Image: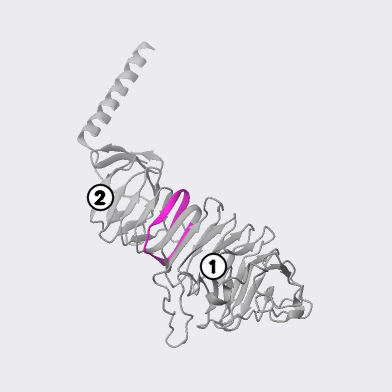
Amino acid sequence: MAGLLVAGAISSLQAETVTWTGAADSSWSNSANWSNGEVPGSSASAGVDVLINSNTGMAADNTIENIGGWDSDPRILNSITFDISGARLYQAGDPYFVLGDSETVGQFTLTSAFTTDGWVFFGGGTRTQNNYRRGRLQFDKGMLLTNNGTGVGIFERAYVQNTVDSANGSVTFAGSGSWLFATNSYLGKARNAPQTSSPYNPGSILTPDAVVNVKLGDNDNAFSGTVTYASSLAMEVTTLEINGGTLNLQDSGINNTGALTVGLNGSFIGTGDIAGAAIVAGQLSPGADGTGTGTFSFGDDLSLQSTAEVLLGITGTGAGTYDHIQLDGGILTYGGSLIVTVDGTYTVGDSWALFTGYGSESGDFDTISINGVTLTKEGDVWVGSASGVNYQFDQAAGELAVVVPEPGTIVFVGLAAVTFALALRRRGRRC
């Protein structure tokens, strides 16, 4: 029903911009708070561009309350722009907004004036109470999320998704700023809002066959910030492209039916499960926050391209003390550079299963380094010494180990020592 209401609503009013004045109180639903005297997104003022550039009249934490919108009567807008240091849209229920229509990409923009980390779209309960209510920020053709500020835009108890009538669409992130999808938020294919709090029901996927693509930057919209996805709900998408900036997966998941691709200028960090295939031409770095240790688990093939950089850290030998890439029977294709940082003291016999679970492996890394020292490839094995410790990486097994130096290496080192000693003696005789 929402899709029927949206179609054609924007084209006739798209040029109109309605500005928040806060002349009466903190309520979105009070027409006296808006420059045209009408409530944006209502039937009287659908398809407009909303500009919020003043905190006049707002409640605590720069909050515009009672934003409204329901399944049967959503707020239909073209765009929302925050040109202010910080603000949030809040409803003690299930607010339902639709940006754009079947022909127009909706836009949610934080300008360079946005300098304070904070919730930008917030649904459910009170501002301090965590319950099962969720706000929905939806799109038909697509949504462009732009942040050019230094503040992080946070979606809290909010679902960013397509409408039930949308067969395909995309969410594109742009700008230099960052976004956070908090624990109770969601990004992907349309999902029911939860209807009960005991037991908690996250809502079922309403459009499993829809094509929903998520992009961090594209040809027309550069992105250099970070999207942190820390939701308890896995992202449900068709494809996911990290063309620029960073996707930080925080103990969450990505259920992708198409490929997850990390472009040359993109970076994928964090820890979590990826259901579909992945192709990496940029940076891949497991870890709780990109620096701590963690695991990426891929349910399908993982292909590391010639430009890929795989960054793995080691702080110990026990589980959870080193980065790990795991596959569930898929094909692992090696390529690019493996860059390992080792912290700690280790002895012969210590080892780390860096890559596990693959059904088969192919290809070769172009370079492997440990603490900045490049290893030498000998068949399927890479060997070298860093900080006085001899390492060996076995590509077939995906394992790095501390080993005894090869006999030839020991002989060479011994001969070098003898030659050096003789040279010193000869030099002493000349003196």
Q: Position of residue 10 (x, y in %)?
A: 63, 69
Q: Residue furthest right?
A: 23
Q: Residue at (58%, 67%) from the top-left corner?
A: 100
Q: Position of residue 68 (x, y in %)?
A: 62, 81
- Callout 1: few (<14), some (14-19), or many (20+) C-alpha neighbours within 10 Å? many
Label 1 to label 2, Cα distance in Å? 44 Å
Q: Which residue is mark 1?
A: 102
Q: Tell me the residue at 37%/46% (across/down).
A: 305
Query: Is disc 1 placed on a helix, strand or loop?
Result: loop
Q: Is residue 250 magenta?
A: yes
Instruction: Say whether residue 351 is visible.
Output: no
For the magenta stretch, what is the residue range?
247-269
Which is in the foreground here, disc 1 or disc 2? 1
Displayed quadrant of residue 355: bottom left
Dot 2: few (<14), some (14–19), or many (≥20) neighbours within 10 Å?
some
Placement of the C terminus among the 4 image quadrants = top left
Residue at left 26%, top 47%?
Answer: 362
Q: Which residue type carries mark 1?
A: Ser
Q: Magenta region, mostly helix, strand or loop?
A: strand
Colour option used: one colour
Indicate whether 228 appears above or below 348: below
* Residue to which mark 2 is pinned: 361
For marks 1 and 2, the one nearer the N-term is 1
- Against 38, residue 430 (above or below) is above
Q: Is residue 416 visible?
A: yes
Total tally of numbered discs in the picture? 2
**Position in image of residue 384 (x %, y %):** 31, 39
At x 24% / y 42%, what residue is drawn?
A: 380
Q: Is residue 278 above or below residue 48?
A: above
Given the image, on which type of amino acid does mark 2 rest? Glu
Report if the CB atoms under discs 1 and 2 are less than 8 Å apart. no
Q: Quadrant of residue 46?
A: bottom right
